[in-house]
Amino acid sequence: MRILVAEDDAILADGVIRALRQSGFAVDWVHNGPEADTALEANQFDLLILDIGLPRKSGLEVLKRLRGRDSHLPVLILTALDGVNDRVRGLDAGADDYLAKPFELAELEARVRALTRRGMAGSPTLLKHGALSYDQVGRVARLNGEALELSAREVSLLEVFLARAGRLVSKDQLVSHLCEWGEEVSANAIEVYVHRLRKKLEPGGVRIVTVRGLGYSLEKHDPR
C-alpha cells in the first residue's frame, strides 16, 4: 500500500513517514502544494495525508483539485487549525478525516487503518485464493489457517498478486506498488522478492507463475 504525505514541516513529516514505514507502507513525501498536485496527477496512491497549511498552494486547494478530477482517494487532513469552522471547511472540500496538530503517532496510525477499511467499502476485506486467505485491513496472510511470516515487501507483493489473480503483473507494476521515489530496485531484486514469496505459498498449492520476459501471474484457483 502506497501513501503520499504532503507536509511542509520536515520534522513532523519524518516522524510520520518512519511510523508508517515501520507498519509496512511505502511512503512518498512532498512539502508544498504544487508538488502534491503534480504527484497526485502522475501517480497512484492508496491514501493521502494532507497538511492544510502547505506553502505555494494550500492543502484545501490541492484537495479541491483532487476531487475535481473525480478521485475517490481517501484523504486525512492534518492541521494546526482546530476550530469547528476549519474542520467543516476541510470536510466540505472532500476530506475523509481530520487530525489536529499536535497528535500522537498511534492515533494517526489508527486513523490510517480506519480510512483503509473505509476505502474498501463494498469490497471484501478478506481475500481468498485456494488455501490462502488475506486480511486486507490487518495485512495478515494465512495458509491453511496458519499465519504466514512475511516481510513488508512480501505482503505488498501479495496484495498486488491477489488484486490481479489470474492476470499478468509486470515487473514495472510491482516496482510502482512497492517502491518510493528515489528508491532503486533492480529487476533482480524483484525476482528475489517473488522467489521468497513463492516458496512460502507453494506448500499450500498456491503458485506464482513466471511469464518469461513479461512478468508474473498468480494462478487462477480452480475449486474443483
Image (cartoon, helix red, strand yellow):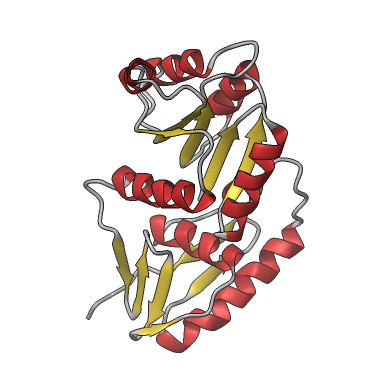
Q: Is residue 37 above or below residue 219?
A: above
Q: Position of residue 36 (x, y in %)?
A: 59, 24
What is the residue that sits farthest to the bottom in this orientation?
A: 203
Q: Is residue 141 above or below residue 76?
A: below
Q: Nearer the viewer, residue 198 or 81?
A: 81
Q: Position of residue 168 (x, y in %)?
A: 49, 56
Q: Quadrant of residue 145?
A: bottom left
Q: Residue at x 67, y 30 (%)?
A: 9
Q: Position of residue 47 (x, y in %)?
A: 46, 39
Q: Residue at x 31, y 69 (%)?
A: 128
Q: Quadrant of residue 144?
A: bottom left
Q: Residue at x 33, y 20 (%)?
A: 84
Q: Is residue 174 above or below residue 6?
A: below
Q: Nearer the viewer, residue 31 or 170?
A: 31
Q: How many numbered marks, from 0 up? A: 0
Q: Do we see residue 174 in this rendering?
A: no
Q: Residue at x 52, y 79 (%)?
A: 149
Quarter of the image where the C terminus is located:
bottom left
Q: Position of residue 211 (x, y in %)?
A: 57, 63
Q: Do we see residue 79 in this rendering?
A: yes
Q: Nearer the viewer, residue 185 or 117?
A: 117
Q: Is residue 201 left or right of residue 188?
A: left
Q: Is residue 137 above or below residue 54?
A: below
Q: Is residue 208 left or right of residue 88?
A: right
Q: Is residue 112 left or right of residue 32?
A: left
